[in-house]
Image: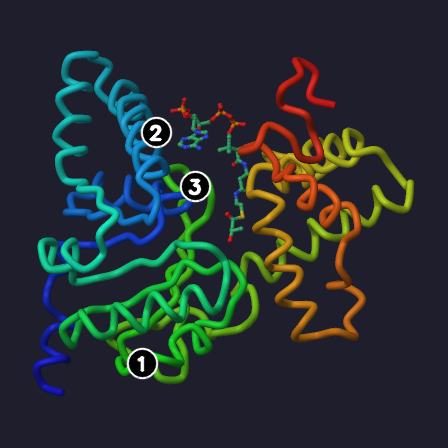
Amino acid sequence: MHGIRKRFYSTINNVLVCGSGLMGRGIAQVTAFSGYNVTLYDIKQDVLNKALELIKDNLNHSFNKQLNDKTKAVEQTNKTLARIKASTDLNSTFVASSPDLVIEAIIEDLEAKKTLFAHLDKIAPPGVIFASNTSSLSITDIASGVSRKDNFVGLHFFSPVPIMKLVEIVKTEHSSPETAIICKDTPGFIVNRLLVPYLLESVKLYDQGIASIKDIDTAMKLGAGYPMGPFELLDYVGLDVVKFINDAWHAKNPQDPMFQPSQSINKLVAEGNLGKKTGKGFYDYTKKNKL
Ligand code: 3HC
């Protein structure tokens, strides 16, 4: 126990990020930008390649803006990229990178997350901190199969990760005070607990014919000062992600009218229209005029 506690206080140098989708690649980018060594793990090589390309472009953009010097920006981008290793082999990656912290950002599926953490628990030395970036699942449930429950927290980032300044740190009743202190393990934590009902309510307004997608978005941007309207944000976050959250909360609270499944979202997801990432969601991004 003493050894474990000592490790809590030791500096984190190496971070393993599991999952290289929208969130995982953003987390890897900001972590490397902040000076940590990062290993980005994914089961798909093509997704990893794409993530590295996007990270490179984003870093280059940020450094260009910060330094106002193209040559220096390329230098800094390459220096930061050199801190990111990408791999599809979890076991050998783990040994080679010796992470102090693992951040999971894979598919929003409880069983998939539990399976990954059960495996990590076997190969990670005691004291390695495990964190999940889940948007909606209970951290306690995700951690239920691991032995290191005191070293398990939620680290909830927001999209786009390099721009949004908040990270929710979520503790369970088992998390040690040295590991986390901020928010209780409650569905949606703080932001999604408020944001997701707002998004779902917007879809209901549209489904009931009360206003058009464009008018609802314009109203919230001009009337509430939000940078994106709810439908732009739904498409941006991904309709599959929002459906996962909606379904999980509906399963837990089947009587709550707030979380009744949304026909519009289910239909779009069934058609493979997941939002901006697939080119179509509530808006059609393949057209010049989105609607
Ligand atoms: N990655 C990195 N940088 C990005 C980016 C991305 N995906 N998208 C935009 N940016 C950068 C741009 O490069 C630009 O940087 P610059 O000022 O240095 O040039 C800056 O962000 C502003 O971008 P734009 O000028 O193109 O566009 P906007 O001014 O409209 O800003 C936005 C874009 C920052 C995405 C803004 O619309 C916004 O804040 N939207 C709301 C986002 C939000 O609510 N996120 C939370 C989602 S909920 C969530 O993630 C939780 C999860 O569990 C579901």
Tell whether 51 sits left or right of 279.
Answer: left
Question: Cα distance, mark 2 to mark 3?
Answer: 10 Å
Label 3 CA crowd tier, 10 Å (few <14, some 14–19, many 20+): some
Q: Secondary structure at mark 1?
A: helix
**Location of mark 1 (residue):** 149
Question: Cα distance, mark 2 to mark 1?
Answer: 34 Å
Residue 5 appears in which quarter of the rendering? bottom left
| Amino acid type of the residue tagged 3 in the rendering | Leu
Tell whether 219 sits left or right of 79.
Answer: right
Residue 7 appears in which quarter of the rendering? bottom left
| Amino acid type of the residue tagged 1 in the rendering | Lys
Label 1 CA crowd tier, 10 Å (few <14, some 14–19, many 20+): many
**Location of mark 2 (residue):** 54
Tell me which numbered mark, 2 or 1, is placed earlier along the sequence: 2
Tell me which numbered mark, 2 or 3, is placed earlier along the sequence: 3
Instruction: Farthest residue to the right: give it.
Output: 209
**Location of mark 3 (residue):** 22
Mark 2 near mark 1, Cβ–Cβ under 8 Å? no
The C terminus sits in image quarter: top right
Q: Secondary structure at mark 3?
A: helix
